Image: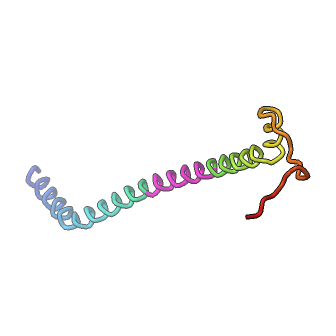
Amino acid sequence: MIREKAIELKKDFSYIKKYIKYWLFFTAVSGTLVIYNQYYFSVEREITQLAEIKNQLTAKNMLLKKEISKLSSPDRIGKIAELHLKMKPVDYSNVRFIDQ
């Protein structure tokens, strides 16, 4: 009985030994695909985050450009010159141009 079990185990081992190359290859390919898939999703997530940051910065840039144009408007600068610097608008009738 023990001898029969030993012979049966030997046959099973030879069967496993015969196909182990294929199982190892299959396992290696599967593992490689799983690792590649994880890397792909991490890169995809990073790209999405960077695109979102880019959109936020673009919106902020547009707001800052709008604020710059508002702050540099001639009307605003003229009002500041009159109120804080006590300047008056130019009266060209009193201005004399000198030609050289």
Q: In the picture shown, does residue 10 fall above or below 85? A: below
Q: Position of residue 38 (x, y in %)?
A: 42, 53
Q: Residue furthest top?
A: 84
Is 24 inside the magenta-drawn segment?
A: no
Residue 55 appears left or right of 39: right
Name the residue located 88 percent from the left edge and 52 percent from the top edge: 92
In magenta segment, residue 46: yes
**Residue farthest toward the right in the current orientation of the protein:** 93
Q: State left or right for residue 60 relative to residue 79.
A: left
Q: Residue furthest left?
A: 3
Q: Residue at x 81, y 42 (%)?
A: 76
Closer to the camera, 43 or 51? 51
Residue 14 appears left or right of 55: left
Instruction: Please tell me which residue is depicted at 81% across the width and 48% down the height of the picture.
Output: 74
Can you tell which quarter of the image residue 97 is in?
Answer: bottom right
- Viewer-proximal residue among 72 and 3: 72
Residue 28 lies in quadrant: bottom left
Q: Report the span colored magenta.
A: 40-55
> In the rendered image, which quarter contains the C terminus?
bottom right
Residue 25 position by quadrant: bottom left
Instruction: Tell me where residue 20 appears, x and y as whole percent.
Output: 22, 63
Q: Is residue 29 left or right of residue 87?
A: left
Does residue 83 lie above or below 70 as drawn? Answer: above
Instruction: Kindly report the secondary structure that dominates the magenta region of the rendered protein.
Output: helix
